[in-house]
Amino acid sequence: MPDRALSFGTTAEAYERFRPGYPAALVDTVLTYAGRPIRTALEIGAGTGKATRLFAGRGVTVTATEPDGAMLAELRRHVPAGVRTVRAAFEDLRPGERYGLVYAAAALHWTKPEGRWSRVAALLEPGGVFASFGGPVRLADPAVEEAVRAARAPFLASDDIPSPDGTPPEQDMQWPGTELQRSEWFADVRQSVIERRETMTARDYVGLLSTVSAYLVLPAADREEVFRRITLVLPEAVEIAGDITVHLARRRSEP
């Protein structure tokens, strides 16, 4: 997992180009849950700033943190001037300023579990909101999905990221909601799903796969061959299902 966590810098431009963005309904969900104005936010692992732009566009003053220099450089090309950027891993952030919102967009699973929730709590105002959101991008057509699975099988059994705490996929509450429910620092844990559908060309779908960590850590020759094989089984255009699972929690005044 550490290798996968640090694999994205080589593909920052492709990440920005091919990864789907987030719908406006995501910000609505977070702000409605907060129940009060959110003026400041800290983003964990901001990547190229797809979520950053969404929150900044709603008047939130965002501090975007990202450990990879290439990803952060790409982010700076796309976010409003008012966004503050910091090159740092979550574990290297030091308590100081507190925020009304701390959030992670498809990035929390890359953070270290030890002390995770006490560190998040230290960055939040009492009553402040934590949000984590993301989810796998799948091919909507099961037959095409199976063809891609078979094409990659000689090189990669799965391109999924397993649940960090081993929560089975059939359980109602998924990670990180499971950890938040156990944490003494948080209350009012909620989980919801926002539907996301998009149609893209086969070429763009392979471009999307080129930003997925499971492929990025393959040897270059294997990566090129698996993409060639996947391309051969794809129709000219594909529909993707990238539903976003949102987890929300509120920082307790005292643990």
Image (cartoon, helix red, strand yellow):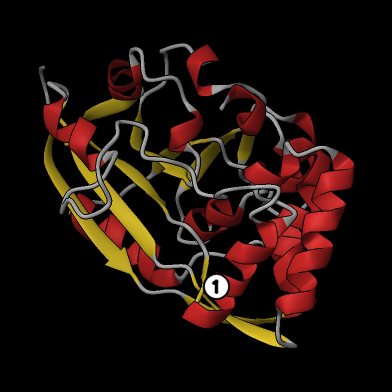
Count up the numbered dots. 1
Which image quarter holds the C terminus? top left
* Side of 164 relative to 214 (left or right): left
- Residue under the image location 22 percent in, 31 percent down: 179
Which image quarter holds the N terminus? top right
Q: Nearer the viewer, residue 97 or 222?
A: 222
Residue at the outermost front position: 154
**Mark 1 crowdedness (10 Å alpha carbons): few <14, some 14-19, many ≥20:** some
- Residue under the image location 43 percent in, 56 percent down: 135
Please tell me in which quadrant of the rendered image residue 120 appears.
Answer: top left
Residue receiving disc 1: 145
* Side of 150 relative to 118 (left or right): right
* Side of 103 relative to 69 (left or right): left
Residue 55 in sight in this render = yes
- Residue under the image location 77 percent in, 30 percent down: 69
Q: Nearer the viewer, residue 250 or 226?
A: 226
Residue 119 position within the rendered picture, expressed as x and y whole percent measured from the top left: 35, 17
Q: Is residue 47 above or below residue 143?
A: above
Residue at the outermost bottom position: 236
Residue 42 in sight in this render = no
- Residue under the image location 63 percent in, 83 percent down: 238
Residue 88 position within the rendered picture, expressed as x and y whole percent measured from the top left: 62, 21
Mark 1 residue type:
Glu
Q: Nearer the viewer, residue 39 or 106?
A: 106
Q: Is residue 118 above or below residue 157?
A: above
Please tell me in which quadrant of the rendered image residue 122 appears.
Answer: top left
Residue 175 position within the rendered picture, expressed as x and y whole percent measured from the top left: 28, 41
Please tell me whether mark 1 sits on a helix, a strand or a loop: helix
Q: Is residue 98 above or below residue 224?
A: above
Residue at the outermost right position: 221
* Side of 53 relative to 10 (left or right): left
